Amino acid sequence: MDKRLGVYICHCGGNISDYVDVEKVREAIENDGCVLMSKTTQFACSDSNQKEMVLDIQEQNLSGIVVASCSPKLHLNTFRQVSERADLNKYNYVHANIREQASWAHSDDKKGATEKTILLVKAAIAKARLAESLTPNKIMAINAVAVIGGGVAGLKAAISLSDKNTQVVLIEREPFIGGRVGQWGEMFTTNQTGNELISSLYAQLVTRKNVQIYTNSEVVSYSGSIGDFSLKIETTPRYISQDCDAKELQKAMDVCPVVVPDPFTFGITNRKAIYGFAASQYPKQATIDDAACTHCGACEKVSKNIDLSLQKEMVELHVGSVLMATGFDPYTPENGEFGYAENESVITLPQFKKLIDNSESKLIYKGKEIKNIAYIYCVGSRQGDEGNSYCSRYCCTSTIHSAIIAKKKFKNIHNFHFNRGIRTYGKQEVLYAESLKLGDLYLQATDDSPAEVYSENGRTWVKVNDILTESKEMQVEVDLVVLVTGMVPRSDKKVSTLFKLPKGRDRFLNEIHMKLRPVETAIDGITIAGTCQSPKNVAESVNSSLSAATKAFSYISKGELETEPIVVEIDAVKCTWCNECSTACPFDAITQGLDGDRKIAVVNTTVCKGCGMCTPVCPTDAIDLVTFSSKEIMNMIDALTEQI
Amino acid sequence: MANINPKFGEKLKEYGAENFNACYNCGTCTAVCSLSTPEDSFPRNMVRCSTLGQDQEIEASLKPWLCYYCGECSLHCPQDANPGELMMSLRRWLTAKYDWTGFSGLLYKSLAVTLISLIVVALGVVGFAYQQNFELESLMHYGHYFEMIAIGSVFAVVLVPNIIRMWYFVIIKPKKKVAFATYFKASGDFFVHMFTQKRSLGCDDNQVRWFEHLILVFGYLALLFTTVFLDWFDSKNLFVIALGYIESIAVFVITADFVNSRLKKQKAVSTHSQPSDWLFVVGLLLMGFTAFLVRLAIDMNMIQSQLWIFIVHLIVLAQWALIVVPFGKWTHFLYRSFAMYFAKLIELSK
Ligand SMILES: Cc1cc2nc3c(=O)[nH]c(=O)nc-3n(C[C@H](O)[C@H](O)[C@H](O)COP(=O)(O)OP(=O)(O)OC[C@H]3O[C@@H](n4cnc5c(N)ncnc54)[C@H](O)[C@@H]3O)c2cc1C
Ligand code: SF4
Ligand code: SF4
């Protein structure tokens, strides 16, 4: 039996009808075989029109509808819900985008726009004719979430999920949780130290029965999909038992022959391969740096609590969703970039922060007392098209905050800020005001003529064409140059590659929609939080982590998940298992299976996203995408190429 | 290439500048200033030079003298950086810079030095009176000549060399080329500005203050002329006597109004009074007042018995002529007039 279709053509105020003669469109299709009724409407999405559609469907007993209006990105769900309210299976509704594709695109050619609209609507009708009722796929969802990364974002997400009675697995690659925040002393804007923040979060976490914390651990493989991910986690041993006391540890550290730059202080101090923990580092258990340790055995000889023979351990876990919070790396300047690595008075902002924290009454670097400090902003950020074009957001404020701390903590400090426009947005502006009041000097460079660091006879100078002083060349001699380095994505991309998470042009992990779906990724069931997504300060990281936790919870909270039935189907008879489709699939949804004893392709319908990448590569045309079958597409093409 | 010198800002604070480093260079002050022009744009630019310690540039600049302190900039500054008071402080700093004796700077920076010099002058006058056995005749005689001699020597020894220094800083050192004839062409401007301060009329809502100022300048100069050349205290001419009374009352009334507004801090210009500002207005006030009292005592035949009135007047006069005129705020009046003149020179030589 042929379909009984209702067609609605929208004016969109005047957005469509100013360029497209909608009445003419309606007339052109009203006599199409299966079109039972056709209407034009001012606003298809308005409440009154929605009610009218429901009545039409019920009274005229329609078996399908076509809505010709704006982009389906905007109102697909609106009209699906209209269908459902009228007891019409929502997959019987087909959309034609006549605004973006016709009226807006051809506002200079009204006749052409109208003709194109007629064809678009006819194509939609052709598709609607073949549309079938479908039911969404239902899959089981495990009430557990893996949080990868134990920085401030990961910790807050773990607490939030645990509050919702979800099982949480927190996986931290380093021996200690805390991330970058654990490395900082006093922080803007609350002036709490990193230690205070991390200690309070850890104290909230450890007591919870539904949270498991894995430190020194990494996800090494995964399978499955939303609702049921199976993760393999590899844990590197600490080699030191909890019973090792401070004295014994000190002895072991004394004998350890391996000295490496301490990553905790960004290399301004050194540590041994065996080392203890700072106040902000949890759990309170010393460890051996597996990468640096030569297994010489010296420490084992002085402590019975050290056992170098321990091996890596592997566990397998099942979770319904994964929350990524792997954080950022500070940008490392190129050698010679503003004198970095060539002039020993040049350091980075993270190093400067550690220097302030580690210094008592005097600020001393490399044996020299520091009085005049130059800060060079936007190093590694806002580099234009060739480099990192984004602003790292945290750094203007952090620099000003650190400069104020230095001025208050040490005597006779003069701060010179060589910036490119200060961005202490929002409440952080008060810090800028305070800094100005304290007499810090701000010089502003243009993008094409940045500040320059140069040295003469062992003395370091910074100069700039200051646009606030009529672009005159200004210079000052300084004792220390601090490069305000921005944020870059973690250099180790193993996990993000493992999960095939898409990255943006800035190389940070990408959300689906910056505004409307800010924590979801293209991989269903995997959310992103904190600075692995983009530069953020703590408040912003925590905002996104709480939102990611809530999103993750929404996937698994019902124990069951609905997914779109728009997936591919394989014709077992035509399929020859040539393997083309499974290599084309970006989501690993196609695997080899058996039809009797014949090898054929099998689709995991929970993983398939209906992208259609596999359909054109199949040499025997054995694959069809539901709602976009070859037949439907061909009929649409026929309609589009019809002569009016 | 210019060196940044944050210490200069500290120095300016001794001259009364405050919080100017809070400036974030929005330019509001320059936008609202009714005297700033695209060629001579201020005060933001002067605030900037001050924060970065560009003292050479300020020394060569006439901009501080082009400002008449209506206070609009300070009123609108979103950072409370007080650009108007900064301009005032730059005038004080420049005055000290021009002064070859260095005494101006000391007076601005130290209240103690100011008080001590006032006391020394007062003691000098009393000592002199003692030496003259407090004889009215000779005191009046010397008092009359003192005024002429003091004014003459202050000009010759302090003010003229300082004006030459100012000329050196703003014209010669920055290598501005000015033809000889131009010095004559521009001289008209000099006198007009000196006597009328007409430029300050460009400030918004400044008419009343400008008028008061005008009366004060003429009143003060006329009183000077009446006492020195018409010998007011010794005169029997009724017209001269009446003239002196009117002049001294005018000076007294207007300065009393100035003192009052400084006390009440009504306008931006009067909210930040430095000792040098007080010295100036109170000095003027006392000059008018004591001159008036002296003549009144003469007319009432009380001067013999109330000799102290004359001695007080002499003290005020000596402090004025030896401290305020050569080193204090009085010089602003002179430098400002010359600044207008130099500005004209530079403009004509472009
Ligand atoms: C110099 C400097 C000063 C700053 N000062 C301030 C300030 O004063 N105030 C403020 O609000 N913000 C400040 N920030 C920003 C703040 O540091 C960040 O907002 C915050 O650290 C982001 O937290 P995060 O959890 O997203 O990332 P991170 O802190 O980077 O934590 C990520 C965690 O994930 C772990 N991880 C990474 N990869 C893996 C993996 N594959 N498997 C398991 N675990 C992994 C890491 O070991 C780390 O523990 C500053 C930043 C810098 C660079
Ligand atoms: S926050 Fe400031 S320093 Fe950092 S990149 Fe942005 S503008 Fe540059
Ligand atoms: S208005 Fe204030 S903040 Fe703005 S430029 Fe002038 S002095 Fe600076």
Image (cartoon, rainbow, N blue to C red):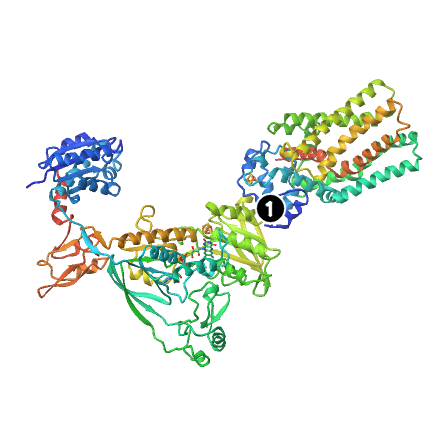
Q: Please tell me whether mark 1 sits on a helix, a strand or a loop.
A: helix
Question: In the depicted view, which residue is nearer to us: A461 or B315?
Answer: B315
Residue B79: in sight, yes or no? Answer: yes
- The quarter of the picture where the C terminus of chain A appears is top left
Question: In the depicted view, which residue is nearer to us: B69 or A40?
Answer: A40
Which quadrant would residue B140 be assigned to in this image? top right
Q: Which residue is mark 1?
A: B51
Residue B178 vs A167, above or below: the answer is above
Q: Amino acid at mark 1?
A: Thr
Which quadrant would residue A18 be assigned to in this image? top left
Question: In the depicted view, which residue is nearer to us: B235 or B155?
Answer: B235
Residue A502: in sight, yes or no? Answer: no
Question: In the depicted view, which residue is nearer to us: A16 or A221?
Answer: A221
Q: Is residue A527 left or right of residue B326?
A: left
- The quarter of the picture where the N terminus of chain A appears is top left
Q: Residue at x 70, y 41 (%)?
A: B168
